[in-house]
Image (cartoon, rainbow, N blue to C red):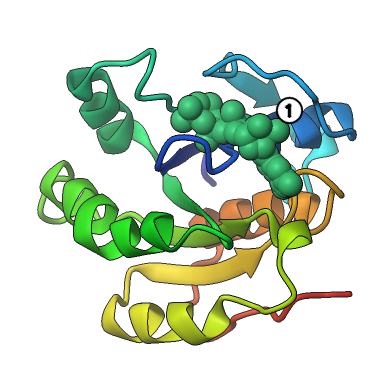
Amino acid sequence: MRKDVRILLVGEPKVGKTSLIMSLVSEEFPTVVPYRAEEITIPADVTPERVPTHIVDYSEAEQTDEQLFQEISKANVICIVYAVNNKTSIEKVTSHWIPLITDNRDKDSRVPLILVGNKSDLVEHSSMETILPIMNQHSEIETCVECSAKNLKNISELFYYAQKAVLHPTGPLYCPERKD
Ligand code: GTP
Ligand code: MG
């Protein structure tokens, strides 16, 4: 049995990484957030899979590349967050984040990735059309999810998928639609 799960959130500035973590913890949308949330540990008995879970934020504004590389190498699962209303943040998933993660892992330590489209409250259309081809090209992507830190949609699901990706990896079979 695994002792614990370490979830790292990365992605372009302002996509809402810190807001997602704070929304999960406080069950409400924080109007003001620091650049980087403190590392939080969720005790085993309140997680769906009964495993202590650490959630680690990243902020370019407060951390060096070296610190980011270290966190990448320590993570058990990495959520690459983009904003569904920000095309550049989606492009950077493949042009920047996936290669950066691959470069900073040992050759034989595959880390599951989860693509997280935040700010779903701001758009009518799902980003899945853009995301599905990316998933097909990268087998290390376990799943994708669209969510909103603002209206708390799919927040607990996101962290559940992350936990599950570590404990019961399945490969890229399942891509949940937006739940309205
Ligand atoms: P850095 O720490 O700078 O990398 O940014 P971040 O990715 O942590 O983003 P942060 O949580 O600071 O949020 C950036 C802005 O987006 C803030 O103004 C948030 O209030 C806003 N925001 C975050 N999540 C949502 C969301 O789900 N919907 C909307 N409408 N706004 C959001
Ligand atoms: Mg932040």
Quadrant assignment, res 32: top right
Which quarter of the image is occupied by the C terminus? bottom right
- Is residue 134 placed above or below 116 in the rendered structure? below
- Residue at 80% of width from left, 26% of height from top? 30
Pointer 1: residues within 10 angstroms few (<14), some, or many (20+)? many
Q: Quadrant of residue 51?
A: top right
Q: Position of residue 70 (x, y in %)?
A: 24, 25
Vertical placement of residue 166 versus 65, above or below? below
The x, y position of residue 169, in whole percent, is 49, 68
Residue 30 relative to residue 98: left or right: right
Badge 1 marks a residue whose secondary structure is helix
The picture quadrant where one finds residue 27 is: top right
Residue sitting at x 15%, y 56%: 108
Can residue 47 be seen here? The reply is yes
Q: Which residue is mark 1?
A: 22
111 on left or right of 96: right
Label 1 CB less than 8 angstroms from ligand 1: yes
Tell me: 142 left or right of 164: left
Q: Is residue 53 at least partly visible in the picture? A: no
Q: Amino acid at mark 1?
A: Met
Q: Residue at x 74, y 33 (%)?
A: 44
Q: Position of residue 58 (x, y in %)?
A: 43, 27
User: Which of the pair 84/163 is nearer the observer?
Assistant: 84
Residue 12: x, y in percent?
40, 42
